[in-house]
């Protein structure tokens, strides 16, 4: 298992980064080509001003009608994405990787705060699962694909938490953490997780069309 | 009421026993000097993770390390790392300051010393909890 861990944190990590980057570039390129072929109007309406107006508005919690209509989901999704990004960039264990591999001493979250944010992410995953099971409108549109990506995103956090707390086999938990995070990275361009790369573009287009064509805000 | 005192021989025995117990307090410290069981440098306090579990003699026996310089490297005249120079007996922190601007800071030095060897040999833990056991 230790040998597999060394492989997962070595060649497999670089392969995951490469697939993630190449896949993302390819997905964005094919979407641009598709829009050029089928929807040339997209390029005519696109505006920097309306784009950023919409992006910033939707980045503000409770800043839009959509966010106000579902307060629980608004809190859940903002907490989830914010904690996820903070942990990805500033988890103490990740800072140690930067320090050891590249000699970069970066700022990191205090241990207690990183643990708390991890629990928040896990709780948000539970909330998303509950929502998919219990809210009829959400349940109706939920597919196996949705469950698969939710499970995939949940795994790196639960394994990180158990490894940190040294519950269960620590090597297994750390290995699961690395492998599942690499799976998420690879899945981003090819699954519904692609909202991570596409959301700024969809938001920008919505903002541009509502602003430039309908002359009204898109929130 | 008259105070009761221990008789002479008993008193002497009690004093010797107490003195012996006091000496025993130093025993763990004395033992750890001889056989290192964990790496917990004072300079890195307060530690945020459990101290790295490290049985010096058992580790070296298992890894087949006889040469002290395998870990205890020294430095040359210019202050550069010299793998041939034996620095056994010198604390790591004496050369690797915690917040060193030039050279390798203490925590990074520990991590590089242990993890990179474990990676090269594909032996020994390279994940956090493998050494930092609570």
Image (tube, coloured by chain):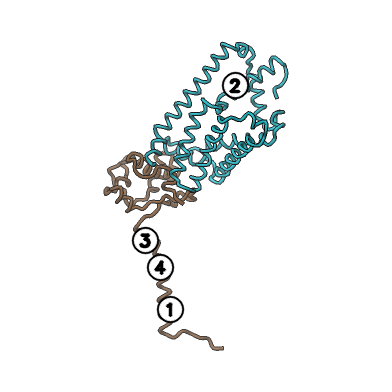
Chain colours: A cyan, B brown
A146 lies left or right of B61: right
- Is there a contact, CB below 8 Å, between mark 1 and mark 2? no
Neighbor class of circle 2 (other Cα within 10 Å; few <14, some 14-19, many 20+) is some
Pick whichever of labels 1 and 3 is earlier in the sequence: 1
- In the rendered image, residues at marks 2 and 3 fall on the same chain: no
> x, y (%) of residue A207?
66, 20
Mark 1: which secondary structure? helix
- Is there a contact, CB below 8 Å, between mark 1 and mark 4? no
How far, Cα to Cα, is label 1 from label 2? 84 Å
Q: Residue furthest bottom?
A: B1
Q: In this rendering, is residue B12 above or below A9?
A: below
Mark 4: which secondary structure? helix
Query: Which residue carries the number 2 mark?
Result: A201
Q: Which sits in the foreground, A25 or B19?
A: A25
Task: For mark 3, name the chain.
Answer: B
Q: In this rendering, is residue A167 above or below B101?
A: below
- Is there a contact, CB below 8 Å, between mark 1 and mark 3? no
Query: Which residue carries the number 3 mark?
Result: B31
- In the rendered image, residues at marks 1 and 2 fall on the same chain: no
How far, Cα to Cα, is label 2 from label 3? 65 Å
Query: What residue is shown at x 64% (from left), y 16% (from top)?
Result: A47
Task: For mark 2, name the chain.
Answer: A
Query: Which residue carries the number 1 mark?
Result: B14
How far, Cα to Cα, is label 1 from label 3? 26 Å
Task: For mark 1, name the chain.
Answer: B
- Is there a contact, CB below 8 Å, between mark 4 and mark 3? no
Query: What residue is shown at x 49% (from left), y 37% (from top)?
Result: A106
Q: Which sits in the foreground, A105 or A44?
A: A44
- In the rendered image, residues at marks 1 and 3 fall on the same chain: yes
Query: Which residue carries the number 4 mark?
Result: B24
């Amino acid at each position: 298992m230790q040998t597999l861990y060394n492989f997962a944190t070595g060649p497999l990590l670089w392969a995951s980064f490469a697939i993630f980057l190449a896949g993302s570039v390819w997905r964005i390129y094919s979407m641009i080509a598709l829009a050029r072929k089928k929807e040339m109007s997209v390029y005519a309406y696109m505006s920097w001003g309306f784009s950023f107006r919409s992006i910033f508005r939707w980045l503000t919690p409770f800043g839009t009608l959509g966010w106000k209509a579902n307060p629980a989901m608004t809190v859940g999704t903002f907490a989830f994405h914010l904690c996820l990004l903070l942990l990805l960039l500033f988890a103490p264990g990740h800072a140690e990787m930067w320090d050891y591999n590249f000699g970069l001493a970066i700022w990191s979250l205090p241990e207690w705060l990183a643990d708390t944010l991890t629990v928040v992410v896990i709780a948000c995953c539970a909330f998303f699962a509950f929502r998919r099971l219990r809210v009829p409108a959400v349940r109706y549109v939920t597919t196996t694909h949705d469950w698969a990506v939710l499970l995939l995103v949940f795994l790196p956090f639960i394994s990180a938490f158990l490894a940190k707390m040294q519950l269960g086999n620590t090597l297994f938990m750390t290995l699961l953490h690395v492998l599942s995070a690499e799976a998420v990275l690879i899945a981003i361009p090819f699954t519904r997780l692609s909202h991570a790369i596409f959301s700024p573009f969809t938001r920008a287009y919505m903002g541009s069309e509502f602003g430039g064509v309908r002359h009204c805000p898109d929130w | 009421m008259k105070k009761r005192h221990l008789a002479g021989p008993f008193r002497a025995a009690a004093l010797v026993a107490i003195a012996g117990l006091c000496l025993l307090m130093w025993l763990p410290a004395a033992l750890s000097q001889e056989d290192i069981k964990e790496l917990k440098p004072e300079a890195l306090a307060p530690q945020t993770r459990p101290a790295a579990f490290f049985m010096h003699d058992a580790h070296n026996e298992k890894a087949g390390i006889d040469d002290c310089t395998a870990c205890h490297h020294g430095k040359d005249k210019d202050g550069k790392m010299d793998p041939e120079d034996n620095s056994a007996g010198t604390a790591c922190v004496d050369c690797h300051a915690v917040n060193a601007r030039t050279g390798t800071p203490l925590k990074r030095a520990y991590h590089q010393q242990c993890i990179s060897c474990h990676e090269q040999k594909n032996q020994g833990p390279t994940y956090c909890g493998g050494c930092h056991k609570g």
